[in-house]
Amino acid sequence: MSRVETVLLPELDGPVPATLPSALGLLSLALGVGALVAPGPVARMTGVDDSPAARAVLPAVGARELANAAGLLSGRRPAGWAWARVAGDAADLTLLGRALADRHGARRRRVALTTLAIAGINAVVVLAAVRIGRARRARARVIRMEIAVTVNRSPAEAYRFWRDVENLPRFMAHLESVRADDLRRSHWIARGPAGHRVEWDAEIIDDQPNKSITWRSLPGTRVPNAGRVRFAPAPGDRGTEVRVELRYAPPAGALGRAVAKLFGEEPEQQVRDDLRRFKQVLETGEVVRSEGSPSGISVRQQAMQRPAQPLPASRR
């Protein structure tokens, strides 16, 4: 797994820690062992020690919890095992509801407290299952690409230009603006398909002067993304090889990519065009529109081609 991949995946988990399935597994393990090893004390603590059936039900509950623990701790299909735990807790709540109706005094209070505790745990597990599933689906639709261009400038010059993130809209056609908030954090505004605007905050998490820059979006963005750009001397003293790695998860998955392609904004082609414009800016100081339509390849754009000319000053 590449450095960019390890940067992106935690972002896709959003506010749910990557260790959450393990935490749920450990909770199930503790409950399962308690119900199997000490059913009597567990029955007294939960207020059902006066029920002859409790001694038979609690070991079954413990075995179910141990099965959930094994699944969650294995790391395989965590969302499925989390939902299995939700179903088990729902069954427990049904049994506790019946027990609550038949109890009085101190036992009723213990059953009520147990019911509240199980309901609270179940609510947390439902939230975790939803978020784990959402993160898994986001990872499944991640678009990955790696593209390079050779620029007739030194690695130091290429690095300095890219490191000033407010320069990025000068050659990235889909960007309206990038505002540097400090040395590492910035706010980005981009144009999406059909004229939609997308905004997000990003941070530089690894900065090696004249060598590479690695960044990622901050939690909460609609389009989680991460990337790295590397600057290496090109063979034969031909300047600098600029290599870009990108990982991002579009909100509409394959459908979103198909729509973007229809409008001449296929992601990989877009990045290639951006790097070509980066080369032009560094080598000539401006971006020139060509009859080849470097800003897009849709039928609509080709029909509206104009003679070659520099980009407007507002886009430089």
Image (tube, rainbow, N blue to C red):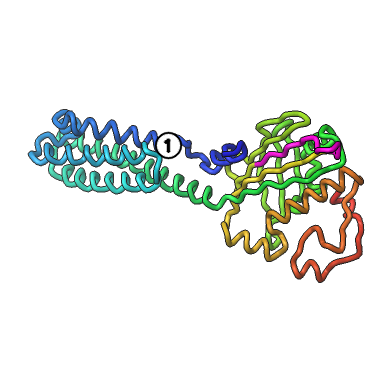
Residue at image point 67% right, 52% down: 198
Left or right: 5 in relation to 272? left
Q: How many marks?
A: 1
Crowd around label 1: few <14 · some 14–19 · many ≥20 (10 Å) = some
Q: Nearer the viewer, residue 261 or 315?
A: 261
Left or right: 44 in relation to 287? left
Residue 205 is a magenta residue = no
Q: Nearer the viewer, residue 243 or 7?
A: 243
Q: Name the residue type under label 1.
A: Leu
Q: Quadrant of the N terminus?
A: top right
Residue 231 is a magenta residue = yes
x and y, in percent, of residue 239 in the image: 85, 38
Q: Secondary structure at mark 1?
A: helix
Span of residues in magenta: 227-239
Quadrant hosting residue 197: bottom right
**Residue situated furthest front in the rendering:** 236
The residue identified by callout 1 is 20
Residue at image point 71% right, 51% down: 190
Q: Nearer the viewer, residue 115 or 58?
A: 58
Q: Nearer the viewer, residue 74 or 89?
A: 74
